[in-house]
Amino acid sequence: MVAETAKKFEALELQAHKLMSVFIKAGHEAVAPAIIQPASVFLDVIGETLRARTYVFTDPDGEELCLRPDLTVPICRLHLERHEDPTTRARYCYNGPAFRFQPSGSSSSHPREFRQAGIESIGAVDLERAEALTLVTVIDALKAVGLTDIKLRFGDLGLFRALLDAAEMPERWRRRLLHQFWRPQAFRNELKRLTTAAIDLPRDAPKALLAELDPERPSDAEKRVARHLDAEGIEIVGTRGVAEITANLLSIVADANTKPLSIETATLLEAYIGIVAPARAAGARIKDLLREKNIDIGPALDAYHRRLQLLTEAGVDIARADFEAEFGRTLEYYTGFVFEVVAPSLGAQSPVAGGGRYDQLMRQCGAAEGVAAVGGAIHTERLLAALTGGV
Amino acid sequence: MSATQDRLVLAVPSKGRLMEQTTELLAAAGLNIRKVGNARGYRGEIEGLANVDVAFISASEIARYLKTGRAHLGVTGEDLVREQMSDWQDRVEILKPLGFGQANVVVAVPQCWIDVRVMADLDEIAVSFRETHGRWFRVATKYLNLTRRFLSSRGLTDFRIIESLGATEGTPAAGTADFIVDITTTGETLKANGLKVLDDGVILMSEANLIASRVANWTPRAREAENEIIACLGL
């Protein structure tokens, strides 16, 4: 299988041609971003876990490059290259190879070279409409090549963020929980830590120094930390300066002086994350859960229902969709609605398509600020396998 | 291949303290290594053992020889074995720690990070670091695999490894990395570069080991030679 990648090439090309014509008809411009990408964009943005699966190499100029592990980041770079104003509205579609290391013994539905066909919609102001349209277009493309028996999985990080915003806690705890959301075990540990009274004080900063630090007076604190380092003969080495170190010491001091997170809030967050329900019923489940606690995340729930409504109006069978609060945890750049399309013959471990909202990715690729963006990609080898039976 | 292919290949470090200590240890066990050919040669034999070829190569090369089975026995550090083989237990067997070449592979951060003492502290500042600098932490090391495995096993996923082939301890000061994973014996070099080892940041306590390859061609003659060496070393 590894030696021969072009075996089904003709069949894949034929299929891709049909997918692309659905995308183009829906208003997407066909583009072909570079296969070889600067590694730093992927590695600094997405982190080491993806690096472990990305083919990275150094060219004769010493430049660190990679074979693109997906097409969404390359499309963001292409968009930024074309448009001075990154919020410029644009719709793209593509078909081409992506590369990810797979440990030996991986199943044939996880090849290390695979062809993705997909769409990206950038700068659309009506978020739910853009999300619904993206999913509908992907489903239409699947239908056009003959895949009609599908199931859908939804997640919504917007709901989780709204819940965090509504729960009572310092802003920096929200940031930390949101960051840890991607890692279930770390998230549980963080929740536990925040609900426990005793917060560890850093052992290399003497108690006397910590006692002097006043979160209300950061510049005074910075001076005191600088004086301490000077007195100890410790040089400032590296990128983190005194201001940054002080800011962290202050937040630790502030945490130690803050009432721990209430057990109720922690339980609520865990209960929310545990929700798995048919998409239609999930909204009501969430509402019930929050009503007991007197927490209101109205706008986020409205957006959730409106999206379902738009999908239904466009003919998507929502009865075939499940909502999982935890879904989306493995894909770090998604920020809102996430979806997967599953062909029952291949199973949930090998979805034929997936996508979602990624409003911060453009900023991480170099734009001054985030840009509303949503996209979806089809794993074309799996799609072909689902249609022809067997991988 | 030559007629010597069924003999045992013993890989020995080709330079420095590691070579001296290895030859001393073998000599003390009655195994005298003699270089074959000119004095700078890279091949040798052991007096009285007809079925042994000695190959003088660098310690990291020895790990590769054992991994691929080009050498039957070799003296090298556990750090190199674990770094170069993800499946090292399938490929080699550690026969005997030799009591020299001790060094630790550690996570070291700038001393001025007085808010960081343990790995969990690193994870905590990863978020604000990224908000401030627009990128994840960079970790300089020559131990790419050991580092990746250790950091992920501690739940730290938001970092980027920068391969460093020398003077790793200088990379935080130079600004090319934020902290490092490196080998240290006394910690003096780290200290001189304004770095400190995290309390739970010892990844591996390594020393020189006599190591056998499981994937080498173990002919009866090679096996016999191994038994003779092992008997001399009192294993």
Image (cartoon, rainbow, N blue to C red):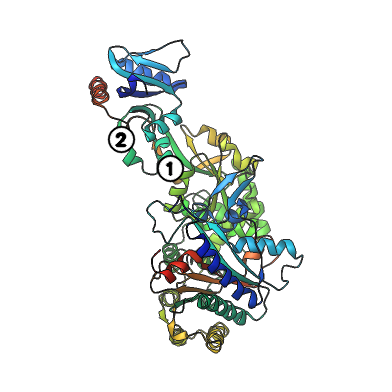
Q: Please, what secondary structure does the residue beneath circle 1 have? A: strand
Q: Tag 1: residue type?
A: Val
Q: Residues within 10 Å of mark 2 (few under 14, many from 20)?
A: many
Q: Please, what secondary structure does the residue beneath circle 2 have? A: loop
Q: Residues within 10 Å of mark 1 (few under 14, many from 20)?
A: some
Of the pair B218 and B173, the residue shown nearer to us: B218
| Mark positioned earlier in the residue sequence (1 or 2) | 1
Inspect this view and state whether residue A357 appears.
Answer: no
Q: Residue at x 50, y 66 (%)?
A: A379
Looking at the image, residue A336 lies above or below residue A62: below
Q: Tag 2: residue type?
A: Arg
Kindly report which numbered mark, 1 or 2, lies closer to the viewer in this rendering: 2
The residue tagged 1 is: B202
**Subunit that carries the residue with mark 2:** B
Of the pair A93 and A223, the residue shown nearer to us: A93
x and y, in percent, of residue A189 in the image: 42, 63
Task: Find the residue positioned furthest to the top.
Answer: B38
Task: Find the residue positioned furthest to the right.
Answer: A84
x and y, in percent, of residue B63 in the image: 41, 32
Measure the alpha-carbon separation of dots 1 and 2: 28 Å
The residue tagged 2 is: B214
